[in-house]
């Protein structure tokens, strides 16, 4: 498993992964708009894209848009590798935190994020559609907020 910057050559495969993973998937064109922005990483196995993480950055804040792994490559460490590399790059960019929303019923994802150091910080009622469901907000704190002791 290798983690690399998301490239244009990954987009068709990542759009297919999106369709396999989400009720409202991002298209290849939507992913293309993120090239060169924030931190967008792809997991590759045998040269093929098998997953990705997208993180938009604003000042010193990181907002994960999606974590998606091809169903045939789940539980093989791709998501863990993507999150670890994202954390490394977030530190290098001196981000204060990285945050995300996850379906309240997605126990596997919540366990993955908890294992990577993310903590629950809130809930968004009825955040998801198809089906309607709350989101749990989870954050990885990288630095203490200014003025905190």
Image: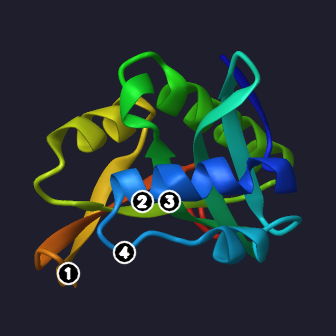
Q: Nearer the viewer, mark 3 or mark 4?
A: 4
Q: Earlier in the sequence, mark 1 or mark 3?
A: 3
Kindly report the distance in space between the C-alpha atoms of the residues bearing marks 1 and 2: 15 Å
Q: Position of residue 13 (x, y in %)?
A: 63, 47
Q: Looking at the rendering, which quadrant does residue 123 occupy? A: bottom left
Looking at the rendered structure, the secondary structure element under dot 1 is loop
**Label 1 Cα crowd, 10 Å radius (few <14 / some 14-19 / many 20+):** few
Q: Quadrant of the N terminus?
A: top right
Q: Are marks 4 and 1 in contact (CB under 8 Å)?
A: yes
The residue that label 2 is drawn on is 19
Looking at the rendered structure, the secondary structure element under dot 4 is loop
Q: Are marks 1 and 3 in contact (CB under 8 Å)?
A: no
Q: Are marks 3 and 4 in contact (CB under 8 Å)?
A: no
Q: Looking at the rendering, which quadrant does residue 25 occupy? A: bottom left
Kindly report the distance in space between the C-alpha atoms of the residues bearing marks 4 and 1: 9 Å
Q: Nearer the viewer, mark 4 or mark 1?
A: 4
Q: Earlier in the sequence, mark 1 or mark 2?
A: 2
Q: Earlier in the sequence, mark 2 or mark 4?
A: 2
Kindly report the distance in space between the C-alpha atoms of the residues bearing marks 1 and 3: 15 Å
The residue that label 4 is drawn on is 24
| Residue drawn at point x = 17 percent, y = 77 percent | 130
| Residue drawn at point x = 82 percent, y = 69 percent | 37
| Residue drawn at point x = 47 percent, y = 47 percent | 68
Kindly report the distance in space between the C-alpha atoms of the residues bearing marks 3 and 4: 11 Å
Q: Which mark is residue 129?
A: 1
């Amino acid at each position: 498993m290798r983690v690399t910057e998301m490239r244009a050559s990954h987009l068709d495969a990542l759009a297919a992964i999106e369709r396999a993973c989400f009720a409202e998937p991002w298209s290849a064109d939507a992913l293309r708009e993120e090239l060169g922005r924030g931190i967008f990483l792809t997991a590759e196995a045998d040269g093929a894209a098998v997953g990705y993480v997208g993180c938009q950055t604003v000042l010193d804040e990181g907002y994960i848009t999606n974590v998606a792994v091809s169903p045939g490559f789940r539980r093989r460490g791709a998501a863990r590798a993507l999150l670890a590399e994202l954390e490394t790059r977030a530190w290098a960019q001196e981000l204060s935190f990285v945050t995300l929303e996850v379906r309240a019923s997605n126990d596997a994802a919540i366990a993955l994020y908890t294992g990577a150091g993310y903590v629950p910080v809130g809930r968004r009622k009825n955040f998801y559609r198809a089906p309607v469901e709350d989101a749990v907000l989870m954050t990885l704190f990288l630095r203490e907020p200014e003025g905190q002791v």
